Image (cartoon, helix red, strand yellow):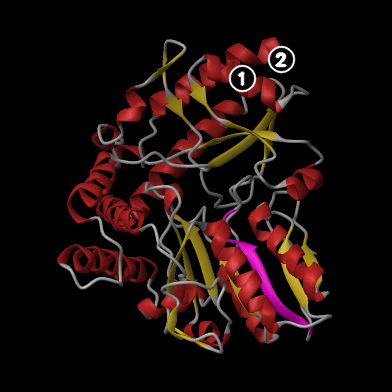
Amino acid sequence: MIMSFDPLMYRKDFPILDREIYGKPLVYFDNTASTQTPSEVVREIEKMYFTHKANVHRGVHTLSQEMTALMEQTRQRVREFISARSTREIIFTRGTTEAINLVASSYGELLKEGDEIILSVMEHHANIVPWQLLRNRKKIVIKVIPMLADGSLDMDAYRGLLSERTRVVSVTHVSNVLGTVNPVKEIVALAHSVGAVALIDGAQAVAHRKVDISDIDADFYAFSSHKMYGPTGIGVLYGRESLLEKMPPYQGGGEMISHVTFEHTDYAELPFKFEAGTPDYVGIAALRSAIDYLTVIGVERVGSHEQSLLDYTTARMLEIDGMRLFGTAPGKEAIISFLIGGAHHYDTGMLLDKLGIAVRTGHHCAQPLMHALGVEGTVRASFALYNTIEECDRFIAALHRVAPMLA
């Protein structure tokens, strides 16, 4: 229930929420794109730059040793956060996009012509384009799981797509457009039943629900810091150790080697084999702070609060003439995609912005899904731990105001 969670306790940690837009208090409902960052995470970044900054894993001096320890403490914290087995399975990337590209590029080298990859119709472009690039290089086959009318995946169709040629199944945990929570444990188990590996895009999941890699049993799981109250430019790829050992490096350079001659290179042990070059060790240390912040509050409590906002706002939106909602699957996350009548999503978003309401408009990097829905784009509102019922009421009032202008 909403009363068991008071977002006002945490709003003070996010100074940006005190801003005004066009003279109106900011209502930030673009959390699916990026959450805001609490002060203590920003202070951690400042602390790293002012007291610890030195390149990691390469120096014997105190600053380098301190920074290396902080980076590796974050790796351990990530392992605990997603219940992975070993820090050897935790690879730092620039985000979910790079994590998926790493798997498509590196594990993809193990595939051959005619092998099949299964995606879903609701995938973000980051989980489509890398596989298309692989298809162009290796002449593999991409198959697509359709969805049902409520925005849930057609699991019967998925079962029908699986075959002895299926090598990879790569699907999103939570749709960034519809909020649909996919049955990833079942999806992974079915992939394994035909000998395929499974990658899960967890970008929209980790800040809203407990993710247990051991329970899901995914072979790869990817997510981004900036969608879970952390800094931008940092992401995580979990990879099953036995698979990572077989995969060739994604990039070459410093850090990912143990010995180099002009004739031959020996690669570093995991996870460093996949972390070429100087990492964003400051951002990585700050990610630990963001995980701690979210964990102290409680991911389940945050998710419950967001669900309350979703239920309340959805019911109020349905009272507005011409309102069209997309994605009604049971148990969906706190994401609302909508259109008002035949109005263009961009016009709706611009008018809401004039009233201080920040929402996302467009195809949300999911154009195939838009085609399946029969629209060019939608308006998307999404919630986070600092959003309030009062903000939802302001949003609803704004929609009532702009709807007649768009008729």
Q: Is residue 358 above or below residue 206?
A: above
Q: Tell me where residue 174 sits by quadrant.
A: bottom right
> From the viewer's perspective, is 208 left or right of 174?
left
> From the viewer's perspective, is 375 left or right of 260?
right
The span picked out in magenta is: 165-174
What x and y, as percent, mark residue 266?
48, 88
Residue shown at the point (52%, 68%) measured from the top left: 221
Q: Which residue is mark 2?
A: 406
The amino acid beneath tag 2 is Leu
What x and y, as percent, mark residue 355?
51, 15
> From the viewer's perspective, is 321 left or right of 277?
right
Q: Is residue 334 above or below residue 194?
A: above
The amino acid beneath tag 1 is Met
Quick one: 140 or 384, which is closer to the camera?
Answer: 140
Quarter holding the C terminus?
Answer: top right
Residue shown at the point (76%, 63%) measured from the top left: 132
Q: Which residue is mark 1?
A: 350
What x and y, as percent, mark residue 283?
35, 53
